[in-house]
Image: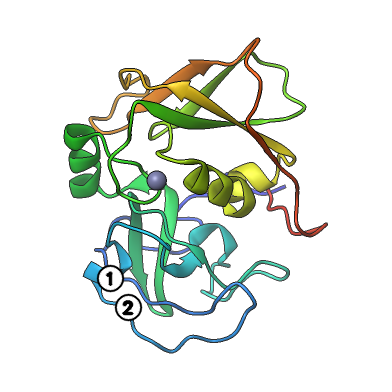
């Protein structure tokens, strides 16, 4: 049994700044380029790759079987550690989250959302509504990236993508910047379906 993932469990400081450092690309090749804070969180595409807190052991090493780096979500907090920066998908950077809310930006890439947004759901789901922690995404591009790379979704593969009219963000969890979008998807046909790329690399949640 393991406790739920948390920064303290992983031995990381709670919110120690926004300095990021790219460690490896998707194939595991070491990238020695130091990513400064601005580059690590710059909006746009493609997303910078860096270590994900989900993949890191308490001693700072990458977990067995985990990718060395994943695309860094624009809104995620990057936590400085002794072995480099890691990003935490469950922690929003407060400043960027305020911009995300005020300017209606995509949490993945930081670009403005349009009138149609994109939500994800496991194909074999039991519920007819989905909650997008941090809001629906701006594009099919960001949705497919998330379905293929985010441990939360790869553990639920295959994942379906739905295009929906944008709605107001609703803060269901509180905490000032824990904004969510909930969308009803019953009766809506998915526009894409993302299957797992590799067996056994789907993450632990
Ligand atoms: Zn986006």
Q: In which quarter of the image is residue 130?
A: top right
Residue, far right: 199
Residue 117 is at least partly visible in this image:
yes
Q: Can residue 3 be seen in this snapshot?
A: no
Image point 39% across, 31% down: which residue?
135
Residue holding disc 2 = 35
| 198 relative position to 60: left or right | right
- Badge 2 crowding class, 10 Å Cα cut-off, few under 14, some 14 to 19, many 20 or more, is some
Instruction: Say above or below: 43 vs 68.
Output: above
Which residue lies at the image location 49% right of the left edge and 68% below the top edge?
Answer: 51
* Residue 66 vertical position relative to residue 119 in the rendered view, above or below: below
Residue at the disc numbered 1? 39
Up the image or down, 77 lies above or below 103; here it is below
The extreme top residue here reads 187
Mark 2: C-beta under 8 Å from nearest atom of ligand 1: no
- Towards the viewer: 145 or 41: 145
**Residue pictured at 53% horizontal, 79% vertical:** 24
Report x, y in % for residue 106.
34, 41
Residue 60 in percent (x, y) is at 51, 74
Which of the pair 184/56 is nearer the observer? 184
């Amino acid at each position: 049994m393991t406790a739920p993932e948390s920064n303290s469990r992983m031995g990381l400081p709670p919110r120690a700044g926004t300095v990021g450092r790219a460690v490896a690309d998707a194939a595991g090749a070491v990238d020695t380029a130091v990513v400064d804070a601005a580059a690590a969180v710059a909006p746009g595409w493609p997303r910078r790759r860096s270590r994900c807190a989900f993949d890191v052991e308490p001693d700072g090493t990458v977990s067995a079987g985990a990718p060395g780096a994943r695309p860094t979500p624009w809104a995620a907090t990057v936590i400085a550690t002794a072995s480099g920066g890691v990003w935490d998908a469950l922690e929003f950077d407060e400043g960027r989250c305020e911009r995300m809310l005020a300017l209606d930006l995509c949490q993945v890439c930081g670009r403005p959302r349009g009138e149609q947004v994109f939500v994800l759901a496991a194909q074999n789901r039991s519920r007819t509504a989905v909650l997008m922690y941090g809001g629906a995404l701006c594009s099919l591009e960001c949705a497919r990236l998330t379905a293929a790379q985010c441990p939360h979704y790869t553990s639920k593969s295959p994942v379906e993508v739905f295009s929906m009219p944008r709605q107001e963000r609703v803060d269901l969890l509180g905490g000032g910047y824990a904004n969510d979008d909930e969308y009803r998807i019953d009766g809506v046909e998915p526009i894409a379906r993302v299957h797992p790329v590799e067996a056994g690399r789907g993450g632990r949640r």
